[in-house]
Structures are given as C-alpha cells and as structure tokens.
Amino acid sequence: MEELSAEERHLVELAIEATSRSYAPYSKFCVGAAVRLDNGVEIIGCNQENAAYPSGLCAERTALFAAGAQYPDQPVRMLAIAARGTHGDLEEEPVGPCGSCRQVIIESETRAKAPIRILLYGKKYVYVIDGVRELMPLTFSEF
C-alpha cells in the first residue's frame, strides 16, 4: 500500500473496516467498500446477504446507492474494495466487483461524466484502476 497516496490508503482502510459490518451468514465472504465523493465525504458499504440469494446486495452497490441517496449531486471520485474470505482473514489477492456492480459503477461514471478511480485491495498488492471501463469495456449502456 506504500505506493498509494494518503487519501487512497485511508479509503482502503475504510473498506477493510467495512468488511467487519458485512452480513454474510451464507457465503461467509465479507466484502467492504468505501467511496469518496467530490466534496470529500466518504461513505462505506458492505455486502448484505439474504436467504433468497438474489435479494442480497454487494458492498459496492450498498456504498454507491447510499452515496446517491444521501448526496445525489456529488460525483463519486474514488471507490475502494476489500474482502475477507471464509477463513476470516483479508484476501491475499485483490477482489474485483461483479458484473452487476461494474454496471452500477459505469452508471455512476456516466452521470458524473468522469471516471471513478478504483482501488482493489489484497494483502499482497493493490490494483489501481482509472475507470471501470478498464474492467468492463463493452458496457450495457453502449448498445
């Protein structure tokens, strides 16, 4: 994490902290996310599972939807994601967002007319991605 700025490290730390708030009784895979808005406000999210699997939500979407509900006119500038595996320890390798979350991030970027810097944390290293289109080049909204 040494290569990250202080602001980026702080956001990753918030995502790591958010993993402890996850409700994942079925998968035991706890994911945390943190977003930083253009005005500097930071909002966390964590995955929330449900016995009816499609009814749960990923950490990225809980954070992005909370940001949109609380600060509808503030663009998201940065998103950090961290995860704890079924063993309870932070994942060694970075974990990326699922396809549904990628599409929600794309929608956030489109609304803001600017890319969102994405930090995917793993104990071994952190991926830094300058815009979700690097992860999902052919987006739903482009067809």
Image (cartoon, rainbow, N blue to C red):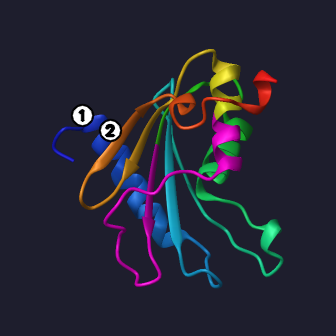
Considering depth in this image, is 69 or 35 the residue closer to the camera?
A: 35
Mark 1 surroundings within 10 Å by alpha-carbon count, few (fewer than 14), some (14 through 19), many (20 or more): few
Residue 83 appears at what percent x and percent y?
45, 65
- Residue occupied by mark 1: 5
Mark linked to residue 142:
none
Mark 2 surroundings within 10 Å by alpha-carbon count, few (fewer than 14), some (14 through 19), many (20 or more): many
Task: Decide whether residue 86 is among the magenta residues.
Answer: yes
The amino acid on which the numbered mark 1 sits, given as a three-letter code, is Ser
Task: Confirm or deny contact between disc 2 and disc 1 (CB under 8 A).
Answer: yes
Considering depth in this image, is 128 or 25 the residue closer to the camera?
A: 128
Task: Please state, as top left, top right, bottom left or bottom right, where the C terminus lies in the image.
Answer: top right
For mark 2, give the secondary structure.
Answer: helix
Q: Residue furthest top?
A: 113
The amino acid on which the numbered mark 2 sits, given as a three-letter code, is Glu
Q: Residue at x 36, y 68 (%)?
A: 91
| Residues rendered magenta in the picture | 80-105
Question: Considering only vertical position in the picture, is 129 above or below 14?
Answer: above
Question: Considering only vertical position in the picture, is 21 above or below 100?
Answer: below
Question: Considering only vertical position in the picture, is 38 above or below 140?
Answer: above
Quadrant in the rendering for residue 72: top right
Residue 45 appears at what percent x and percent y?
58, 55
Q: Residue at x 31, y 66 (%)?
A: 92
- Residue occupied by mark 2: 8
Question: Considering only vertical position in the picture, is 108 above or below 21?
Answer: above
For mark 1, give the secondary structure.
Answer: loop
Residue 109 appears at what percent x and percent y?
62, 25
Considering depth in this image, is 43 or 123 the residue closer to the camera?
A: 123
Left or right side of 44 for 83: left
Q: Residue at x 70, y 21 (%)?
A: 111
Residue 19 appears at what percent x and percent y?
47, 67
Q: Mark 2 and mark 1: span between their CA atoms?
A: 5 Å
